[in-house]
Image: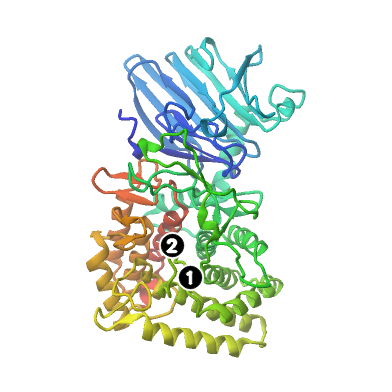
């Protein structure tokens, strides 16, 4: 089996951190949380990154499947001499990997943690309890307990004989409180927590609106979205990985393990639309917590998972990168950007939650945030800003941004009316009308018969697909019909697959962006063409990997996912599209 085949990649999560696994090897595991340094980073450098593998000796065939709607993976290895079943999961509440096994054959366990993304090799201590990997420059470490009949081959390498058992690897920020310490009794029993963890994940989706078409993909994507939530704060990371290349061998490599206001707001809106209202509210609570009422409502386009500033962007020069794609970046310089579309995304998510839940008290409690956003939008909407695609140092009057500023004021007025507020509503509504009039004039090209990327441009941008989704313009309006035609003519690389735009500050765009297929399908649903929408969703799913994960981009030649994986944007968009496709009331309106 080719090691580079990312179509078999799996995603594990416990709502505090996550792991990425390929063919029985865990190659990514940030500790103790999503945005921490990873102690297994082989996905970014096979030689230096570190990994945790459990595989039979010799050749094998592997099939993998999630347990129900959980983030727990069952791997079935088959060889000519027998079978081996491994269930991999991250237990709730602790930074650990548990791997239970039932095997008819001997197999090899290799545990090679390396701290600080492969920069620091561990010291290793062995005792009758297991093996401890220590970071010599701090108090952190990884302790590993193996239950089963095994022998030690080398440091971190074990041969396990046929039978049943588990491997329990627990990370501790301070080994004084670790698995082998006097406090070790508090940590979970692997067998008991396996059952409890599966029960937890199954219950998380119990309130979701039921669908018939694309049911399996719908529930898998919902589970993945919840797997990207940092449970202690309710924040949603944009993706579980860092620096996986958009284009192999080139430099479009970014760290997405932070909370983009836009992406998280999309998730909150989707969760409300599928009636997972408590989850939607949790995401909104986080976003409200970082609002600045004094000037720009969201000072930054993204935050760390606890609401503070993320680490500055830096390059890890000692890592080769995924398939030799340098540089490997940690942190993200986009934190410094002025992006004026994010307030509208938040307001759309907030309004969706209030509409679906009828939670007027929540709207009243957070009216201060609505006022702050409306005030900022009214004062700033004529400014240039960086677009949602985050072209660095490139500011323009982007049409999508102007529309989102319209959304911010439109939803503020609607929320105000729901809770009986009257102050400023007329003023905000008037400004919304002014924004819309300007966009219709300055953001539309008579030559192209289409809305454009920014004022004065003669290019289109796939973000224009959102105009009907937010109610800015009717999907059947001739001005949008021309826009849809131009987008499909110039940005489609296959039926239902689109690039964002032709080129940017880093050069030509090569691969389709997965979220756009969902936006396109939602437009066709509004056009009353359910058959076309269904075909587009099916096309997108044909490029999901074997475990249902969708990355940021698709390499159509190799059918490999590209960019960070799994991506919140893509899975949120897919769920929205499937939910709408299964909504007869929406289709009957057309």
Q: In which quarter of the image is the N terminus?
A: top left
Numbered label attached to residue 385? 1
Answer with mark 1 or mark 2, whichever residue precedes in sequence. Answer: 1
Numbered label attached to residue 576? 2
Residue shown at the point (37%, 65%) measured from the top left: 519
Q: Where is residue 560 in the image (x, y as percent from the top left)?
A: 31, 43
Q: In which quarter of the image is residue 367?
A: bottom right
Residue shown at the point (25%, 78%) measured from the top left: 448
Q: How crowded is mark 2: few (under 14 residues within 10 Å), some or many (20 or more)?
A: many
> Looking at the image, is 364 positioned above or below residue 262?
below
Q: How crowded is mark 1: few (under 14 residues within 10 Å), some or many (20 or more)?
A: many
Question: Along the line of sight, which residue is nearer the eye, 56 or 564?
Answer: 564
Residue shown at the point (48%, 49%) measured from the top left: 239
Residue shown at the point (31%, 69%) measured from the top left: 524
Q: Position of residue 209 (x, y in %)?
A: 49, 60
Numbered label attached to residue 405? none
């Amino acid at each position: 089996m080719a090691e580079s085949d990312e179509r078999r990649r799996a995603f594990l999560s416990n709502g505090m951190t996550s792991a990425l696994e390929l063919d029985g090897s865990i190659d990514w595991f940030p500790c103790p949380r999503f945005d921490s340094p990873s102690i297994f980073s082989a996905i970014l450098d096979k030689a230096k990154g570190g990994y945790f593998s459990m595989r039979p000796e010799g050749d094998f065939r592997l099939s993998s499947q999630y347990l129900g709607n959980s983030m727990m993976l069952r791997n079935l290895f088959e060889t000519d001499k027998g079978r081996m079943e491994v269930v991999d999961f991250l237990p709730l509440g602790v930074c650990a990997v548990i791997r239970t096994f039932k095997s008819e054959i001997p197999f090899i366990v290799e545990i090679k943690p390396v701290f600080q993304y492969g920069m620091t090799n561990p010291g290793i201590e062995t005792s009758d309890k297991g093996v401890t990997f220590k970071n010599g420059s701090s108090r952190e470490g990884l302790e590993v307990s193996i239950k089963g009949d095994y022998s030690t081959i080398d440091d971190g390498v074990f041969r396990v004989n046929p039978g049943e058992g588990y491997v329990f690897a627990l990370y501790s920020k301070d080994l004084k409180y670790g698995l082998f310490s006097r406090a070790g009794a508090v940590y979970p029993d692997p067998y008991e927590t396996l059952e409890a963890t599966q029960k937890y994940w199954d219950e998380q989706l119990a309130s979701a609106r039921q669908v018939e078409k694309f049911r399996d993909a719908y529930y898998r994507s919902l589970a993945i979205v919840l797997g990207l939530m940092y449970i202690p704060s309710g924040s949603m990371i944009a993706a579980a990985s860092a620096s996986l290349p958009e284009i192999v061998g080139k430099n479009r490599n970014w760290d997405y393990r932070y909370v983009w206001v836009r992406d998280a707001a999309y998730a909150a809106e989707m969760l409300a639309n599928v009636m997972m209202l408590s989850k939607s509210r949790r995401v909104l609570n986080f976003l409200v917590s970082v609002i600045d009422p004094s000037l720009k409502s969201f000072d930054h386009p993204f935050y760390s998972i606890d609401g503070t500033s993320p680490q500055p962007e830096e390059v890890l020069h000692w890592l080769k990168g995924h398939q030799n794609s340098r540089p490997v970046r940690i942190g993200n310089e986009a934190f410094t950007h002025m992006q004026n579309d994010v307030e509208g995304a938040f307001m759309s998510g907030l309004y969706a939650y209030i509409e679906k839940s009828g939670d007027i008290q929540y709207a009243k409690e957070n009216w201060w945030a609505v006022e702050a956003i409306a005030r900022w939008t009214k004062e700033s909407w004529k400014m240039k800003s960086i677009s949602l695609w985050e072209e660095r140092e490139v500011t323009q009057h982007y049409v999508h941004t102007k529309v989102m500023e319209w959304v911010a004021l439109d939803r503020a007025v609607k929320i105000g009316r729901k809770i009986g507020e009257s102050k400023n509503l007329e003023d905000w509504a008037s400004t919304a009308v002014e924004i819309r009039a300007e966009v219709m004039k300055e953001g539309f090209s008579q030559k192209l018969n289409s809305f454009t990327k920014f004022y004065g441009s003669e290019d289109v941008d796939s973000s224009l697909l959102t105009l009907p989704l937010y109610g800015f313009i009717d999907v059947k309006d001739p001005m949008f019909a021309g826009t849809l035609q131009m987008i499909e003519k110039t940005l489609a690389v296959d039926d239902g697959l689109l690039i964002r735009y032709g080129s940017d500050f880093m050069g030509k765009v090569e691969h389709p962006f997965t979220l756009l297929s969902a936006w396109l399908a939602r437009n066709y649903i509004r056009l009353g063409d359910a058959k076309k929408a269904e075909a587009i969703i099916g096309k997108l799913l044909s490029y999901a990997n074997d475990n249902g994960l969708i990355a940021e981009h698709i390499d159509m030649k190799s059918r490999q996912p590209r960019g960070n994986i799994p991506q919140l944007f893509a899975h949120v968009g897919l769920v929205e599209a499937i939910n709408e496709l299964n909504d007869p009331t929406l289709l009957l309106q057309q």
